[in-house]
Image (cartoon, rainbow, N blue to C red):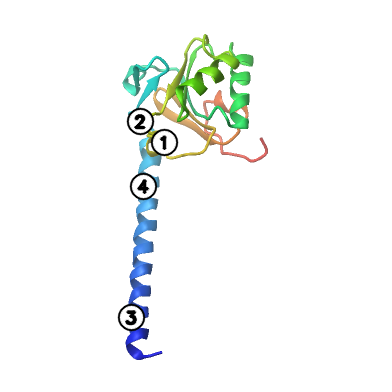
Amino acid sequence: MTQPVKKTIGIFSLLLMAALIILIWGRINTTIEIQEQTQVLPAFTFTNLDHTLFHADQIADYDGRLIIVYFDPDCAYCQDIPKKILLEKEKLKDSKIIMVTQSDRDKVIQYAAAQQLLHIAGLHLLLDTKHAFPGIFGTRAVPSFFVYKHNKLVNKFTGSTRFENLLSDTAIKPSYDR
């Protein structure tokens, strides 16, 4: 291999490594920013099943327990969420639950009807038609749970979790023995 080719490969390798470092650094900074922004209920706008908009400021004055669930009707773990909500309806009577999905409206309506969610007081089924949830809350994983009290983040869970964890007022470290 000639000297100019070695030099070109070396320069290209350095540039590639610098670009990767910049990308990784940017991802770390974005993750930190999202974690900080979710410590207090962040601003968001999603769509109700009746095509009206639902804004975070509609619940900004709510001081009770707010459970935000990111779900997909086709997710096996997400099939259990409504069952748990119905079983624990009495414990949730002073809570609001916001279930957000990127699925299409018809599929969500079928899911809600099959799971008996349409008439639960304090429960809102919302569509993320602009795919904004991951950028606001920092996760694409379903199910994901964000529990707020007095608009401050109390707990956050990605994946399946015990229902009691959603009712806790103290931070719970995620465990994998759910």
Q: Where's residue 11, x and y in %?
A: 33, 77
Crowdedness of circle 4 by 10 Å Cα count: few (<14), some, many (20+)?
some
The image quadrant where one finds the N terminus is bottom left
State yes or no: discs 1 and 2 in contact (Cβ < 8 Å): yes
Q: Where's residue 67, x and y in %?
A: 48, 24
The kind of residue tagged 3 is Thr
Q: Decide: is 140 above or below 103.
A: below
The image quadrant where one finds the C terminus is top right
Spatial CA distance of label 3 from label 1 is 42 Å
Q: Secondary structure at mark 3?
A: helix
Give the farthest residue toward the right: 177
Along the polypeptide, which appears first: circle 2 or circle 3? 3
Along the polypeptide, which appears first: circle 1 or circle 2? 2
State yes or no: discs 3 and 1 in contact (Cβ < 8 Å): no
Q: Where's residue 10, x and y in %?
A: 36, 79
Crowdedness of circle 3 by 10 Å Cα count: few (<14), some, many (20+)?
few
Q: Which residue is mark 1?
A: 137
**Disc number placed over residue 42 in the picture, else none:** 2
Give the farthest residue toward the bottom: 2
Q: Secondary structure at mark 2?
A: loop
Of the pair 44 and 72, the residue shown nearer to us:
72
